[in-house]
Image (tube, helix red, strand yellow):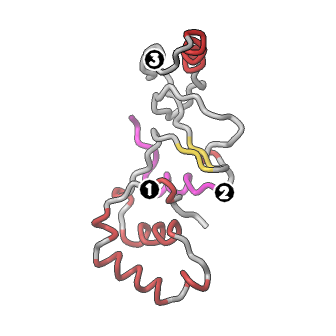
Amino acid sequence: MCHFWSNFDIARLSWFRSKEYEDFFQMMDRSGGFWMERWGDAPIHSLAAGALLAPRDIHYFRDFGYRHTTIQHCPANAPARQRAREPYLEKTTLDEKKRKEEDEYWDNWDPVKENGVGCRCRCDTDIVDVEGKQGSCLAEWVYVAGGWASP
């Protein structure tokens, strides 16, 4: 089932409090699916968003990194749009050698990708990003939303 993962939602609470959403939720509740089928919040929020909102009312934050078990989104670095990186000068690491190691680690960010956002990110490579993961519904969302927005 395609749905928005709700582990990291940013939502306008007024929508969840609206009469339209309340009516939708009450209809779903009366059906007994929460109790008998163990419906979770993510599919319910997704169904409501699909039924009650226009694509322009939903935003996918490509520039926010996120990881939960085997689901990861790591913002891609942008071709020719990377911002200059400030040296890592975190003074909470008292050991000068460790501080330099940290600086070298973060100075070696991931390769750039088309449609990247320019974050200077470095991500775990042992997990496939949700944008390219089999079973992800993101391609369908991009199609419905009219394609990727250019930065």
Eyeballing the image, is 105 above or below 115? Answer: above
Helix, strand or loop for disc 3: loop
86 part of magenta stretch: no
Kind of residue at badge 3: Lys
Rendered-image quadrant of the C terminus: top left
Q: Position of residue 35 (x, y in %)?
A: 57, 84
Is 139 magenta? The answer is yes
Q: Residue at x 56, y 43 (%)?
A: 73
Give x and y (percent) for residue 94.
52, 15
Residue at the image position 58 percent from the left and 64 percent from the top = 2
Q: Which residue is mark 2?
A: 135
For residue 52, which quarter of the picture?
bottom left
**From the viewer's perspective, is residue 41 above or below residue 69?**
below
Indicate which disc residue 91 carries: 3
Q: Residue furthest front?
A: 94
Specify the quadrant of the image occupied by residue 1: bottom right
**What residue is shown with label 1?**
9
145 or 44, which lies in front? 44
Which one is earlier in the sequence, the residue at label 3 or at label 1? Answer: 1
Q: Within 10 Å of the Cα at label 2, are there few (<14), some (14-19), or many (20+) other Cα atoms?
A: few
Q: Amino acid at mark 1?
A: Asp
Task: Compare residues 126 and 146 and report the one nearer the observer.
Answer: 126
Secondary structure of the residue carrying numbered label 2: loop
Spatial distance from mark 1 to mark 2, Cα to Cα?
A: 20 Å
Q: Position of residue 67 (x, y in %)?
A: 58, 45
- Give me the residue at 32% from left, 60% from top: 12
Magenta region: which residues? 136-151
Q: Position of residue 123 (x, y in %)?
A: 60, 33
